[in-house]
Image (tube, grey):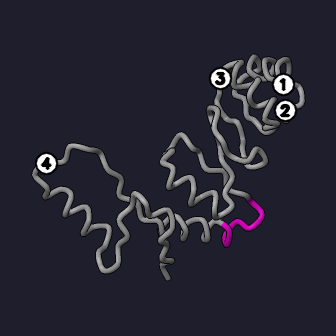
Amino acid sequence: MKTKCTFFAESARILNEETVMDVIREKTEELEQEDPFYILDVGDIVEKVKLWKMKLPRVKPFYAVKCNNHPTVLKILAALGTGFDCASKLGVDQTRIIFANPCKPLSHLRSASKLQIPLMTFDSESELQKISVYYPEAK
């Protein structure tokens, strides 16, 4: 069963009887389209998070913000309790962030330390050494 979701609708078109494919067809038939647009099925996001929680109840999902940083997507995921994998500075509760940039700028490590974002990944020994020098409390 699809979940209907109507919050964060200030810049969105809520579909009642139309489908996402109807909107795509309509957009592709327009003669002039000056501005970019997103077509987003909010119910699909909700269903995928629910499915994740059902199939992997002990594994907390962390969404890679770099995949799609549209505010509506992030607000929906935050409302559903998802954590965030961030590769740069952003305003999300620090207990829900894994700082995952493979080459972290020192300014971002300082920000992570100041904001008490302890969870991070590294891809090399030199990155681990840099983290241990500039943010020794990181995990």
Q: At label 3, which amino acid type do we have?
A: Cys
Q: Nearer the viewer, mark 3 or mark 1?
A: 1
Q: Quadrant of residue 108?
A: top right
Cβ atoms at labels 2 and 1 below 8 Å apart:
yes
Pointer 3 or 4: first along the chain: 4
- Residue at numbered disc 1: 135
Looking at the image, residue 127 lies above or below residue 83: above
Q: CA distance from mark 3 to mark 1?
A: 14 Å
Pointer 2 or 3: first along the chain: 3
Q: Quadrant of the C terminus?
A: top right
- Residue at numbered disc 3: 103
The residue segment tinted magenta is 53-59
Pointer 2 or 4: first along the chain: 4
Which residue is pictured at 30% across the width and 80% down the height?
17
Q: What kind of element bears circle 1?
A: loop
Name the residue at the right extreme: 137
Q: Which mark is residue 47?
A: none
Cβ atoms at labels 3 and 1 below 8 Å apart:
no
Q: Residue 137, image x and y in percent?
A: 89, 30
Q: Which mark is residue 32?
A: 4
Looking at the image, residue 44 lies above or below residue 2: above
Q: What kind of element bears circle 3?
A: loop
Name the residue at the front extreme: 10
- Residue at numbered disc 2: 138
Q: Circle 1: is it few (<14), some (14-19), or many (20+) Cα within 10 Å? A: many
